[in-house]
Amino acid sequence: MPTSAFFTKKRDELVPAPHARGPWSPDMLHGRLLGGLAARALEERHAGPGLHFARLTVDLFRNSPMLPVTVETVLVRDGRRIRVADAVISTDQGVIAQARAVLLRRGEQPEGERSTVTPAWDEPPPSGPPPADGVGWKPPFDLWRVTEWGAPGPGRVWMRERFPLVDDEPLTPFVRAALAADFASPLSNVQAEGLRFINADYTMTLARLPEGELIGVESTGHVSAGGVAAGQVTMHDTTGPLGFCAVTAVANAVAMNG
């Protein structure tokens, strides 16, 4: 069992550890980590007092082998109520991902009842360790499957990170949410025969940041045609819903079984 972070910082590069690989190939970086690295850099360089990270869009341009990565950011817009910043993630083979964060200024919450409100789900947090994984790729994070994998109807999981992202840095709530959000793709796109879509992006929207280490994800929609899929999930913590994540995905020739 690995005990180290997913990446080690060496000068301006982040060097992946063996457990940073993804489920599709043993020599492929996991896309969820690229979203986490983008969130980390954007928060570190562009956070501000009174500003909330309301949206993070991560575009996964290409599969990347297990190579050192660099993350560069740029401030796109800085207004009174909105700040926008981009991140570009590269290896020596070129750009592999890009992300955009939208920060909104917090203010007074409007009074009155909303016409549509996402309810808190009725899944209690896990009371023990996750069950032992089966054959195949082992998730390098704690995963409790509340519903059967690939069964009809909305899928539900609880997730908890086990390792730091970079060196011994504590995970911030925003980075923790960005890591969990990538699970929107397998959860919304899985079927009884396995996962036959691989996501090209994800967009996470947050009304608030998660509290605590546990994040719940519930699939709430899937449509697909001609080998292209769109899916969505609702994200929760132990106190209630906190936001959503939407993904687009393309059919993959080899199914991944969970």
Image: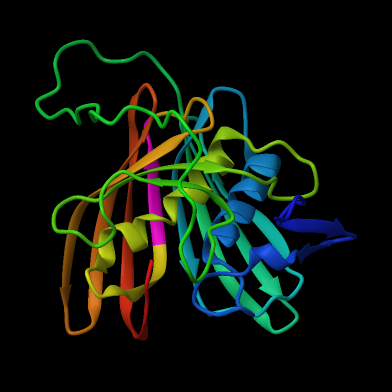
Of residue 43 and residue 77, the one placed in the foreground of this image is 43
In the displayed image of the protein, which residue is found farthest to the left? 115
The percent position of residue 156, horizontal first and vertical second, equals 29, 46
Of residue 82 and residue 25, the one placed in the foreground of this image is 25
Can residue 249 be seen from the camera position used here?
Answer: yes
Q: Quadrant of residue 254?
A: bottom left
Up-down: is 8 above or below 212?
below
The percent position of residue 49, horizontal first and vertical second, equals 61, 24
Q: Which residues are magenta?
A: 202-207
Residue sitting at x 75%, y 50%: 3
Can residue 75 be seen from the camera position used here?
Answer: no
Up-down: is 177 above or below 91?
above
User: Is residue 155 located in the magenta-colored stretch of the structure?
Assistant: no
Q: How is the image coloured?
A: rainbow
In the drawing, does residue 245 fall left or right of residue 86?
left
In the drawing, does residue 42 fall left or right of residue 23?
right
Residue sitting at x 60%, y 77%: 28
In the drawing, does residue 248 fall left or right of residue 132?
left
In the displayed image of the protein, which residue is found farthest to the bottom? 253
Please state, as top left, top right, bottom left or bottom right, where the N terminus lies in the image. Answer: bottom right
Of residue 142 and residue 87, the one placed in the foreground of this image is 142
Residue sitting at x 24%, y 78%: 228
In the displayed image of the protein, which residue is found farthest to the top? 111
The percent position of residue 235, horizontal first and vertical second, equals 35, 40
Up-down: is 171 above or below 255?
above
Please state, as top left, top right, bottom left or bottom right, where the C terminus lies in the image. Answer: bottom left
In the drawing, does residue 241 fall left or right of residue 34?
left
The percent position of residue 146, horizontal first and vertical second, equals 30, 43
Residue sitting at x 75%, y 58%: 7
User: Is residue 203 located in the magenta-colored stretch of the structure?
Assistant: yes
Q: Report the magenta stretch's main SS.
A: strand
